[in-house]
Image (tube, grey):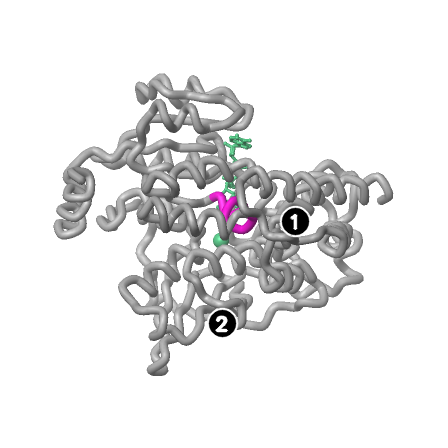
């Protein structure tokens, strides 16, 4: 109760009065390192726990006096021991599910970069948040943008939302032209510097597919009211259309430090070193519809989301398997979508009533996708 009172005071003051203890999971990754920069620069933010998948953490932990450190495994014990005010989940993939549920169940603020956990476990996560009563602040730039445009609005005032996609390095290419693209070409993203898995997802548009499902769960908006448009310069991160005809958009240079800082310092909007948007220099914004034929993973995500149950979980699992195989040089670019499509056709998609059932659905989809790899 005392904690809630303190939060309300902070909210009114719009500035952090008390130290906020952050558990940073995925600390050695692209998001993790940018988060450390934000925490280091802010007098009221403090790291209380660090976790990575395999990389040692001593160099990050020792200078900051972080006592709770873990490499790999189940994050639950680390989270229990470190008692964070905020969990920043920047783990890549379904491996982030336990941390997401841990925070939501306890009402501990969750700053969520790990979209895969919400895509796979949307129903469980939503129920956990309802029970825990805490904040879920998206770190994904588009969802942070939508969150800010939507803040304080009743759902019935909203007509629809628009997610923007950069289009990735292969925008404008046909299916035939995509058949022979290399791993290096897929990793050369035009506007964002990110970890390898999400960079490949951006090239296939699976990232936007995951984000479509993520937006559905975060904001409770039906799929037919979530539109995806390609916007190559990544200046507009999201747009909300309201029922009165007004539309609010969120603009800024593509820099993940902005949504990371927003989530960690919410509702303060602390200063960041990101350049101010220069409008007078000639800001031109262009948009185009996505090419669903060349990038079938976007349409497959929409279908998986609409079918519900564990279809999104299977979509994510098969995509993780296929992306890892593509990065390892075992399959071609177009095989990624083929593997996801075939996996989705073979799973039962039944809803998961528990974490165990969700983990089983994830494992079954992985098994099917791996089986298809052997054939490829
Ligand atoms: P990354 O590959 O750079 O880093 C991943 C981090 O997760 C590393 O610290 C790694 O050690 C850790 N990790 C991997 N497996 C783990 C496990 N089983 N347990 C604990 N830790 C594990 O990835 P990234 O680009 O930082 O992306 C992280 C997440 O944030 C992804 O879900 C991604 O979709 C999302 N995201 C990233 C960006 C971006 O700009 N990088 C933007 C939006 C969303
Ligand atoms: Mg994004």
- Quarter of the image for the C terminus: give it: top right
- Quarter of the image for the N terminus: give it: top left
| In the rendered image, the vertical position of residue 328 relative to residue 245, given as above or below | above
Please rate how many residues cluster around mark 2, counting C-alpha atoms within 10 Å: few if below 14, some from 14 to 19, many from 20. Answer: some
Please rate how many residues cluster around mark 1, counting C-alpha atoms within 10 Å: few if below 14, some from 14 to 19, many from 20. Answer: many
Q: Tell me if 180 is positioned left or right of 105 in this view.
A: right
Q: Tell me if 146 is positioned left or right of 330 in this view.
A: left
Q: Which residue is mark 1?
A: 314
Provide residue 278's location: percent of width, then percent of height.
34, 62
Q: Earlier in the sequence, mark 1 or mark 2?
A: 2
Front residue of 312/52: it is 312
Q: What's the mark number on residue 225?
A: 2
Q: Which of the 4 image quadrants contains residue 206?
A: bottom right
Q: Judge whether residue 202 can be spotted in this image.
A: no
Q: Judge whether residue 156 can be spotted in this image.
A: yes
Q: Residue at x 59, y 52 (%)?
A: 351
Q: Secondary structure at mark 2?
A: helix
Asked if residue 252 lies in the magenta stretch, the reply is no
| In the rendered image, the vertical position of residue 311 relative to residue 290, given as above or below | above
Q: Residue at x 31, y 69 (%)?
A: 154
Provide residue 37's location: percent of width, then percent of height.
35, 35
Q: Secondary structure at mark 1?
A: helix
Query: Which secondary structure type mostly characterizes the magenta part of the structure?
Result: helix
Provide residue 190's location: percent of width, then percent of height.
56, 53
Please name which of the two marks, 1 or 2, marks the residue nearer to the observer: 1
């Amino acid at each position: 109760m005392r904690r809630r009172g303190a939060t309300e005071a902070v909210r009114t003051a719009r500035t952090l009065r008390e130290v906020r203890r952050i558990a940073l999971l995925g600390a050695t990754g692209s998001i993790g390192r940018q988060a450390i920069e934000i925490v280091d620069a802010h007098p009221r933010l403090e790291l209380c726990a660090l976790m990575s998948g395999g990389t040692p953490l001593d160099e990050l932990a020792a200078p900051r006096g972080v006592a709770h450190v873990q490499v790999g495994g189940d994050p639950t014990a680390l989270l229990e021991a470190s008692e964070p005010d905020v969990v920043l989940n920047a783990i890549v993939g379904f491996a982030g599910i336990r941390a997401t549920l841990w925070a939501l169940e306890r009402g501990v603020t969750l700053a969520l970069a790990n979209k895969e956990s919400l895509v796979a476990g949307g129903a469980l996560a939503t129920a956990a948040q309802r029970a825990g009563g805490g904040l879920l602040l998206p770190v994904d730039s588009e969802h942070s943008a939508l969150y800010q445009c939507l803040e304080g609005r009743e759902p019935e005032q909203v007509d629809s939302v628009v997610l923007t996609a950069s289009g990735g390095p292969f925008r404008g290419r046909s299916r035939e032209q995509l058949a022979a693209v290399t791993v290096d070409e897929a990793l050369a993203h035009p506007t964002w510097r990110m970890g390898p898995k999400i960079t490949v997802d951006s090239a296939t548009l699976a990232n936007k597919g995951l984000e479509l499902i993520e937006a559905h769960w975060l904001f409770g908006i039906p799929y037919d009211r979530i539109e995806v448009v390609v916007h190559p310069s990544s200046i507009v991160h999201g747009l909300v259309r309201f029922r009165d005809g007004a539309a609010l958009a969120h603009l800024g240079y593509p820099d993940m430090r902005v949504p990371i800082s927003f989530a960690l310092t919410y509702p303060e909007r602390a200063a960041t070193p990101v350049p101010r948007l220069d409008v007078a220099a000639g800001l031109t914004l262009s948009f185009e519809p996505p090419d669903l034929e060349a990038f079938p993973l976007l349409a497959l995500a929409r279908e998986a989301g609409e079918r519900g149950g564990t279809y999104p979980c299977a979509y994510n699992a098969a995509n993780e398997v296929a992306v890892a195989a593509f990065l390892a040089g075992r399959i071609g670019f177009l095989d990624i979508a083929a593997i996801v499509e075939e996996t989705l056709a073979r799973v039962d998609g039944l809803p998961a009533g528990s974490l165990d059932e969700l983990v089983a659905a994830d494992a079954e989809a992985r098994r099917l996708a791996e089986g298809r790899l052997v054939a490829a």
